[in-house]
Each structure stands twice: as structure tokens, then as C-alpha cells.
Image (tube, rainbow, N blue to C red):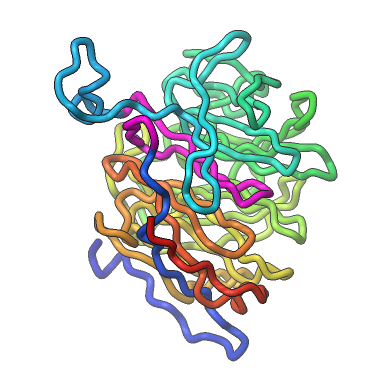
Amino acid sequence: MTDSTKQAPVGLDASDVLPRYQVDPFWPRELPNAWIMSQVGGMAVDSNDHVWVAQRPGKNTDDEVAASLDPPRAMSSYPAPPVIEFDTAGNVIQSWGGPGKGFDWPTKEDGIFVDRNGFVWIAGNGTNDRHVLKFTRKGEFVMQIGHPSDDPPDSNRPDILGQPAAFDIDYEAREIYIADGYLNRRVIVFDSETGEYKRLWGAYGNKPDDAPTGPYDPKAPREQQFRNPVHGVRISNDGKVYVCDRANNRLQVFTKQGHFLHEFLVAPETLGPYIDAIRPQCGSVWDMIFSLDEGQKYLLVADGSNNVIWTLRRSDGKVLGSTGHPGRNAGQFHWLHHFAMDSRGNIYTGEVDTGKRVQRFLLLNPESQGLATPPTAPTPP
């Protein structure tokens, strides 16, 4: 990362108490059964503060899983199941996932979301992954929205998705919002109980357009459509919908009906790293979460290009600080992908490319998030 991609913190207000984090090098515990974790497509925390990971067994290299080959080639590891549930201490509680009867398991696992009713939602960004899945927490199939397809992208088509990336739910309205995605360029909303289509929109609330946009240029007028991937969506306590327009280096904010409110640029000079011809630029806004105080004063933004977590003031989008930096040691990141927060304000991160790991970052000053509980201490294994 060159100096031009760094975004320096602005002056803090007198009321700003920024959350501070420290990596917990003892979390998670060693996986059982000689399992190895691959790229972490998605992260979620449930109402019990259990951490859920959707990871990609198909992205293991032969040398990583040599013991599972036929014949075995070396004393190495075995692929972990796609979905893993950890308790707060980092122990594996259960695992499941993969092809089954009555549903189409994604060819490349991506987002995961555990709703407050205990249902687990799974997305994929493989070539033909044009759907999402809903399971019980034990892995029993409940519902599928969309279906696999090799049709070209069509961000105005409601019957299939476009390599969806992330979810959030409006529980009162019983609606699931989907960031859709790696192929399409939209937010789309369905009934979370029946799968009935409700509405969709593109950047600035525009009708989505899948025409090529050309390379991102920070000096050009702002792009009027989302770029691939539309990588995250979160609903705030005050009913605003925040969308991660990753390769445009911005968060866009909408009403629940898709009316544009405002946007925040984050490290707008960011151009890389290169992924492929469809996603030549990764951008800075990969995922975001709100602080836990009632007013959700801060936004935390996962940036997998610059490999930091930015802290923004939600009222004006100003960058106030950051956590982490590029690298492979504890507390550093290589392609930070998705993250989640527990009820104590601790953060759980997942990495893709060759990062292939999860980490926990302990909140050191709970008062920054309106919490009275003391921070969780690292617990050696």
C-alpha cells in the first residue's frame, strides 16, 4: 500500500472514544480431526455469542490436504466441513455443510448469516451460484431462493441471484436484504419466511444496469452504478440500509425502500489488488458493522485491499482511526474478507486468498461502545 492509499484520521470530537482492540492469539483452539481451514467466505455471530464460519474446502491445495488424497501423499491435514460453529472459547461445537437432498449447495462458499431465530443463511460466489440457502442451526434444509444458472448477469431479474455475498434481516417486516453481488449489481429483498420477491435497487437508488463500467478512476465522476462485487449490507437501529460498494471504495446509505440518502468514501485512492477480469479492482469497503452503543456512533469497515479495519464516525463518515495492517502475524491481515461482532464488542475476522484463517480481536475499552462489561482476557490453551 502506497502512501497515496492511506487515509489519515481526522481530528476527534470531544465526545469521541474510539474502540481499541487487541488480537487474542489463543483463539480459536486447534481444530479437531486434523482439519485445516481454507479461505473464509463468511463470518457471523449468533445470539449466544457463538461464532459461525463459512469456509471453502475446495480452495485447499493438495499439499494442505495431502493426507486425504488417494493414496495419501503425506502426513498433513483433512478438509474441514464448510460450516463450523465455535463457542466463545474457540472450541468447535458442530460442523456441517456440503451437497444434500433437495437443495443446491454453492460451488464456492461465501457469506453466512445467523438470524435471531437461529436460522443459518448461506451464499456462494461460484460461477453458477445464483441462489441462497436457509438451514436450521443443525444443518437441516429449510428454503432456497433462486437456483444455479449459467445465464448472463441480469440485475433486474428477480427469480435468480448473481453470486450473492451477504445478508441482513428486518425482523419486524420479515424481509431479508441480500448484497447481490459478485455478478449482479444490486440489493434485492425477499420475504424471509416464504422467499417471495419484494424489491431491488442499484447505486443511488437507480435501476440497476449491467453494462461494463470500465476501470475505477478516483478522479472521474462517481460511478452511478454499483461495481462488482456488491459485498455487504447492514441495517442500522434507525432503519437505514448500508451497502458495501467495494470496488467503488464507498458505503451507500438508503431507506428500506431503496431511496438514496448519502454515501461515504473510504480510502478512495485504493485500486487493488487484482482478482480477475470480472473484478479487476478490489476496493476498500469489503464489509462493515456498527458499534454496539444505542446510537451506533461508529462504523467499522473491513478493508481487504489495504488490510485494515477503519473506524468511521457514522454521522459524517469521517475516518477516525484503524486497526491492524498487512501481514501474516497475529493481528495482521491478508485479504480481510468478512467480519462480525459479539455482544461484548469483540471482533471476529476471516481472510481469503492465502490468508485462510479466522482471528479474534478483543475490545479493550467497552465504554467506547456503551458497554459496562470488562474486556475478555485472552485464555491460553
Report the quarter where the C terminus lies.
bottom left
Looking at this view, name the residue that lies furthest to the bottom: 14
In the rendering, at what x and y percent does residue 376 appear?
52, 67
Q: Is residue 225 visible?
A: no
The total of numbered circles placed on residues is: 0
Q: Is residue 192 visible?
A: yes
Report the quarter where the N terminus lies.
bottom left
**Seen in the image, is 256 located left or right of residue 158?**
right
**Seen in the image, is 68 located left or right of residue 181?**
left
In the rendering, at what x and y percent does residue 129 appear?
50, 21
Q: Is residue 357 above or below residue 242?
A: above
**In the image, is residue 358 part of the stretch drawn in magenta?**
no
The residue nearer to you, when weighing 30 against 223, is 30
Q: Is residue 178 above or below residue 368?
A: above
Q: Residue at x 43, y 78 (%)?
A: 9
Looking at this view, name the residue that lies furthest to the right: 172
The residue nearer to you, when weighing 21 against 204, is 21
**Seen in the image, is 327 located left or right of residue 50?**
left
**Seen in the image, is 293 located left or right of residue 317?**
right
Q: Residue at x 58, y 60 (%)?
A: 263
In the rendering, at what x and y percent does residue 42 appear?
49, 40
Per the rendered image, the range of residues in magenta is: 32-59
Q: Quadrant of residue 141?
A: top right
The residue nearer to you, when weighing 21 against 259, is 21
Looking at this view, name the residue that lies furthest to the front: 381
Q: Residue at x 47, y 13 (%)?
A: 150
**In the image, is residue 50 part of the stretch drawn in magenta?**
yes
In the rendering, at what x and y percent does residue 18 appear?
53, 78
